[in-house]
Image (spheres, rainbow, N blue to C red):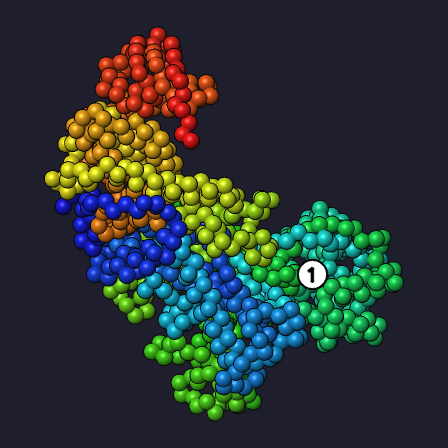
Amino acid sequence: MSENSHDAGHDSTARPMSPAIPDRPSLDGLEGKWDEQWESAKVYAFNHETSREKVFSIDTPPPTASGSLHIGHVFAYTQADILARFHRMAGKDVFYPMGWDDNGLPTERRVQNYFGVRCDPSLSYVENFEPPHRGGNAKTSKPQNQMPISRKNFIELCLELATEDEKAFEHTFRTLGLSVDWNLRYQTIDDNSRAVSQKAFLTHLKNGQAYQAEAPTPWDVTFRTAVAQAEQEDHDREGAYHRLGFTRADNGEKVFIETTRPELLPACVALVAHPDDERYKPLFGTNVISPLFEVEVPVLAHPLAQADKGAGIAMICTFGDATDVIWWRELDLPTRAVIGRDGRFIEDTPWITSEAGRERYAELAGLTVFSAQKRVVEMVTETGDMVGEPKKITHPVKFYEKGDKPLEYVTSRQWYITNGGRDESDGALRTALLRRGEELTWYPEFMASRYRNWVENLTGDWLVSRQRYFGVPIPVWYGLDERGEIDYERVLVPSEDRLPVDPTLDAPEGFEESQRDEPNGFTADPDVFDTWATSSLTPLLATGWLDDRDLFEKVYPMDLRPQGHDIIRTWLFSTVVRSHLLTDSLPWTGASINGWILDPDRKKMSKSKGNVVTPIDLLEKYGSDGVRYWAARARQGADTAFEEGQMKIGRRLAIKILNASKFALGFGEVASDPEGTLPADPAAVTEPLDRAMIASLASVVDQASAAMAKLDYARAIEVIEPFFWTFCDDYIELVKNRAHGAAGEGPAASARAALQIALETLLRLFAPYLPFATDEVWSWWREGSVHAQAWPTSAPLAKTAAGQDESLLRVVSEAIISVRKVKSDAKVSQKTPMLHATLALPEVALAEFESVRFDVCALGSIEELTLEASTDGAITLSKVELGEPPAKKK
């Protein structure tokens, strides 16, 4: 087998054909043409008969199937595709699936707006339900105007819309030229994904790695669901410090605190100061009475209190923020929650016992947090409990990453998976997960620190339950006692052969449906898993973990996870957690991290910010190869500006590949390589300039291969592209007269063979980047697809160069630059004859330059060229005499 041939399963039959070159090569329509042909020929189909050592498997990010893709998707998925294509050409059987992340809040919100509905689990299912409308409607985008429908009807609409979105996504990705195996598609809501997700959870539950707890939980009041730590982000918000006076119960003196949340006064359970703060040491162990609501609370010490923040003494409320939760837990304080799941103040506050306090609280019941704060400030102003005016500040406030209101802390029962965040005893799990991060190969390396920092600063286990509808149901029921009360200690689980199950529709073993929500019967857990709880299983969803052991052993652990740096803390970390707990291994051996796309203001492009650009118009305007080029020029991990200028350059490069290839192939057939390694007989390459060009190309192949071996696709194209332009602008122009036979048949055959050898090598080098233009040219004169060929190696090129180094090509390039500059400075056509010129060269290059005299004179229209040794080693042109410019054609 030749050095440029693949192993079994790859096309190694590419042979020279008589070129069939179109009259006017064009990029137009190539995307549709080649997508169809690739699909028909199964160019990217995974070889299931392979072995593990021959596989390169990729854990492709499943995009959220809601709405439309944006240019950031094109950016990231192109970079991953370049790596997939390289490894395929490097002889690997590439396992490259595509998933759709269907479930979760984005899909629900889109369904609500698109169909004008909202889910009400208390309603019955309606057969053949038709929603109020299809397509957004300003009126029904508001919840109060949306039609309530059953959970089953709502889920059906979610599936319907997600399926339509997925078709549009696939069309875009096919247009982009992603080389995924479309037979390996999966959805995070399909039967397999639900079964895998539920089995994984039940395994965690059995192993003591999943548990439920009723505790204060970060809560989004708009979506009315719990939110995990990894889904939170800080937004800078305007606020104010309010100086409020508590009254000492023993002597009536005032104790002043400063708070940004005066509305939580009725939820106050204590005041707290640092144990070493001399100002407040005398107060520790005493009680104070809260303003307005007249509730007596203790003054306590805790090291988290900050003496230099505000008044140095703070009120603990249940719950204002994460620190309140820590104080509440560690100081064993009572729970006095006042904010409900809807973000409004609740009615019942039995700890407020004074008549005045209850009357004041009655004015707050039912108000939103914003309105309650406003009213409390009015009250403390009226009573004189606030000193001075509020001091305005700007401070970071926690938000759900998809929400538009600050998070509140609400007490609720939720499910958790251990992730080292509460690993308080021996720290074994946290340590193991940190070690996993060290085992992983990071591209680029510095991204490892983001993983490490996240793990080291976790404050709690992973909250995986969500109070939503379109997601993987949590597969448990609870037994009911004789009064019909839920016994949360009596968790009923399904057998694995029943998975997937929906506890709201299916009954547990040993029960009948008639016993649902009846005394001594059962009730379903109504919640679903957080979307990350399923997405974190993508290496298991796609590889047959549940039901295809043969496939699983061939592709897992996977070789690469490509993803953005912003979801290292969510998707990457959570996937490492699940694989560590379920398979005692990393999910993949390497992670390639891409940056963000930035808008002209250097802000991240995102749907939530409304500054995204959709890709279809760009793909049509610049061609998919042009857009891919822009993505390929960005370095791993680096945030990149959205720049159409780079896409223009990419389109120009793709067009140049077509036109230069047409020219290079237009000199007729060449003698075949007896060994079948190259597209032309290397023995025909006899001229020093041709061998110097091939030697230079061999160096490019080595450099590009070394870069790609490190997954540095940007560095590789930085090497390939400049050589290509030199090849087109200098080499082709130099040898075209000779290739036409002007110097005789032997020199012509040398140029023609060198052109075809270089062209074929360049097509292979460019193939991962510009798949459409390269396969188009390949089809003109070679069999099969360029994407089924081997990545080039330098050995056959070096052999062809036969000991010639690349220095001659550099000398000649500098010489013709000098020739062109003289004519440009004289403002005459490059076709203007040069009657005489003297070229000074380094002495070591003089003799060899004689071999290229014909090519240089032909290119520069030089009639008489004198060579001399330069005194300083520079290449200069002097004693130039120009002739008359050629007459312009009428």
- Mark 1 highlights which residue? 316
Q: Percent from the top left, x then y, of residue 123? A: 57, 84
Q: Percent from the top left, x then y, of residue 467? A: 55, 72
Residue located 26% across and 19% down the image: 853
> Of 249 and 193, which appears nearest the observer?
193
Q: Amino acid at mark 1?
A: Ile
> Of 546 and 387, which appears nearest the observer?
546
In the image, 740: left or right of 819? left
Residue located 20% across and 55% down the image: 9
Number of numbered discs: 1
Question: Does the rendering let one see residue 215?
Answer: no
Residue located 25% across and 35% down the image: 755
Query: In the figure, 621 relative to 400: above or below?
Result: above
Query: In the figure, 510 relative to 464: above or below?
Result: below
Question: Does the rendering let one see residue 826?
Answer: yes
User: Would you identify the image quadrant in which residue 769 lies?
Assistant: top left
> Of 754 and 410, which appears nearest the observer?
754
In the image, 802: left or right of 568? left
- Quadrant location of the C terminus? top left
